[in-house]
């Protein structure tokens, strides 16, 4: 019985992604190839690892036990590869990065090509989530978090900060008029966040001197969805400078209440658990990201 790393990777990926199709996509293989790898693995072990139904996959008791060993084996192989690569001065292996969709799309994705050229042996896995995640539960190496940090158990590196602006499309402003002051916002369509209530605090002051907390007419969980709603002329939105910069430069969005907007910047951090075997990959990425942000003035 000779179990291969390919079979172990297929098995763990199926469990992590929840389906053979998703595992095939993650590993760049065919669904039939993943299915055959699982069948070979179960045949070699002479046991059933997964109970398959039309809707879901469920681990058997033997599958749960074997999963822990498989993860340990793959981790040991990754660590060995990392050590050898470190000795040669070239970090390698998979680096899992999680960020809110706007940060991923507008800041990280445009830098992937340059990063891959500099570190060709590091394989990036990019995942988006607009709420705070548990790094261990989501198997994430680095998470980008916008706003004040609450978890002090993790290492964090500040990448910069982003100004908050109020924007709307020219078509919306032509149809409904441009607000001249904060009070005028009461007669406008306001687009807000459905999950993070603090994001519905806008950087303009009410008569009592407090920041305006809006009651949105339309809500969405993702800043990128809110951007598209604003582009579609559905109302006025609060967006980070880096999210709306290209749209404003192209005239697709216009800043409103610019003179009444107060400086409100949200800190942006990269957070991670210190893992010595992953650390060179993490530092390579964070150093590169900070370098690009500073030289290109991305934040």
Image (tube, helix red, strand yellow):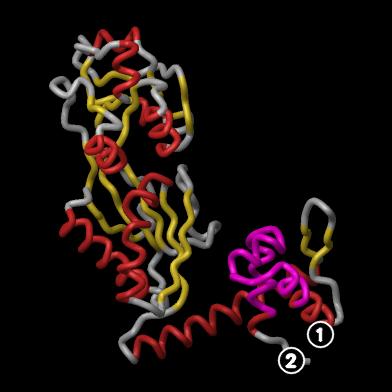
Read off the residue under disc 1: 44
- The secondary structure that most of the magenta stretch takes on is helix
Q: Residue at x 35, y 69 (%)?
A: 282
Residue at 20% x, 63% y is 291
Q: Position of residue 263 (x, y in %)?
A: 16, 32
Separation (CA) of disc 1 from disc 2: 8 Å
Left or right for 45, reference 83 = right
Of label 1 and label 2, which has the lower sequence position? 2
Quarter of the image that includes the N terminus: bottom right
The kind of secondary structure element at disc 1 is helix
Q: Which residues are magenta?
A: 7-36
Q: Which mark is residue 150?
A: none
Does 55 appear above or below 14? Answer: above
Q: Is residue 18 left or right of residue 187?
A: right
Q: Nearer the viewer, residue 245 or 264?
A: 245
Q: Which residue is mark 2?
A: 2
Is-magenta flag for residue 25?
A: yes
**Helix or strand or loop: what does disc 2 sit on?**
loop
Looking at the image, residue 36 sits to the left or right of residue 160; the answer is right
Q: Which residue sits at x=77%, y=63%?
A: 59
Asked if the residue under mark 2 is in contact with the one under mark 1, i.e. CB atoms within 8 Å, the reply is yes
Q: Residue 153 at x, y = what percent?
A: 38, 57
């Amino acid at each position: 019985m000779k179990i291969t790393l390919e079979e172990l990777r297929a098995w763990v990926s199926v469990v992590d992604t929840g389906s053979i199709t998703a595992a095939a996509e993650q590993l760049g293989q065919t669904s039939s190839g993943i299915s055959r790898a699982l069948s070979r693995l179960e045949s070699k072990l002479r046991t059933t690892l997964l109970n398959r139904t039309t809707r879901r996959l469920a681990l058997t008791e033997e599958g749960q036990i074997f999963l822990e060993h498989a993860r340990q084996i793959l981790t040991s192989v990754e660590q060995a590869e990392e050590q050898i690569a470190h000795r040669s001065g070239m970090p390698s292996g998979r680096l899992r990065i999680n960020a809110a969709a706007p940060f991923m799309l507008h800041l990280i994705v445009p830098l992937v090509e340059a990063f891959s050229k500099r570190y060709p042996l590091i394989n990036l896995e990019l995942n988006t989530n607009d709420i705070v995640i548990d790094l261990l539960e989501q198997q994430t190496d680095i998470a980008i978090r916008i706003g004040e940090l609450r978890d002090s158990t993790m290492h964090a590196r500040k990448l910069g900060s982003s100004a908050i602006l109020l924007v709307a499309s020219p078509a919306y402003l032509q149809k409904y008029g441009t607000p001249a002051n904060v009070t005028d916002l009461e007669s406008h369509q306001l687009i807000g966040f459905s999950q993070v209530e603090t994001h519905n605090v806008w950087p303009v002051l009410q008569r009592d001197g407090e920041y305006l907390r809006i009651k949105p007419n339309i809500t969405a969980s993702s800043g990128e969805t809110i951007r598209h709603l604003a582009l579609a002329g559905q109302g006025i939105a609060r967006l980070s400078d880096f999210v709306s910069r290209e749209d404003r430069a192209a005239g697709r969005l216009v800043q409103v209440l610019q003179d009444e907007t107060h400086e409100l910047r949200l800190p942006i951090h990269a957070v991670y658990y210190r893992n010595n075997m992953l650390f060179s990959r993490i530092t390579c990425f964070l150093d590169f990201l900070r370098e690009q942000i500073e030289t290109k003035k991305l934040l």
